[in-house]
Image (cartoon, rainbow, N blue to C red):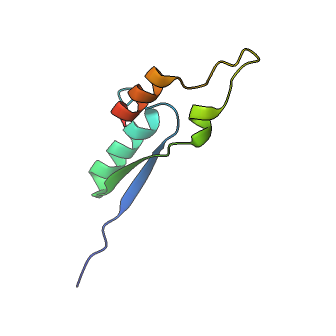
Amino acid sequence: MQHKSQRLIVWFRNDLRVHDNRCLQYAAQYAKHNNVQIVPIYVFDPDFTTKKVSQYGIKKCGENRMRFTIEAV
């Protein structure tokens, strides 16, 4: 008989930090005690790269921030 493996999804929205991410810490503890896999999810939102933040036309995400985000993911 095949056993289903359980997975716990952790959705990273804009904050990719892991060392002080409470949700990730909770998921890691839960996974450890319940034999569950953690599946990290990050969705690249097109608005993140195209949307303007201010009346001055400053982008929410410039080239350097986008490069950093891609490398971090």
**Residue depicted at x 72% and y 19%:** 54
Which residue of the protein is positioned furthest toward the left in this rendering?
1
Corner quadrant of residue 69: top left
In this rendered view, identify the residue nearer to me: 59 or 14: 59
In this rendered view, identify the residue nearer to me: 25 or 47: 47
**Residue depicted at x 39% and y 34%:** 70
Which residue of the protein is positioned furthest toward the bottom in this rendering?
1
For the image, the number of numbered tags is 0
Residue 27 vertical position relative to residue 4 in the rendered view, above or below: above
Q: Is residue 59 left or right of residue 41?
A: right
Pinpoint residue 27: horizontal percent, then vertical percent.
39, 45
Which residue of the protein is positioned furthest toward the top in this rendering?
56
Residue 48 vertical position relative to residue 68 in the rendered view, above or below: below
Corner quadrant of residue 56: top right
Residue 3 vertical position relative to residue 61 in the rendered view, above or below: below
Q: Is residue 38 left or right of residue 16?
A: left
**Quadrant assignment for the C terminus:** top left
Pinpoint residue 9: horizontal percent, then vertical percent.
43, 53
Pinpoint residue 14: horizontal percent, then vertical percent.
52, 33
**Residue depicted at x 22% and y 85%:** 1
**Residue depicted at x 68% and y 26%:** 52
In this rendered view, identify the residue nearer to me: 33 or 44: 44
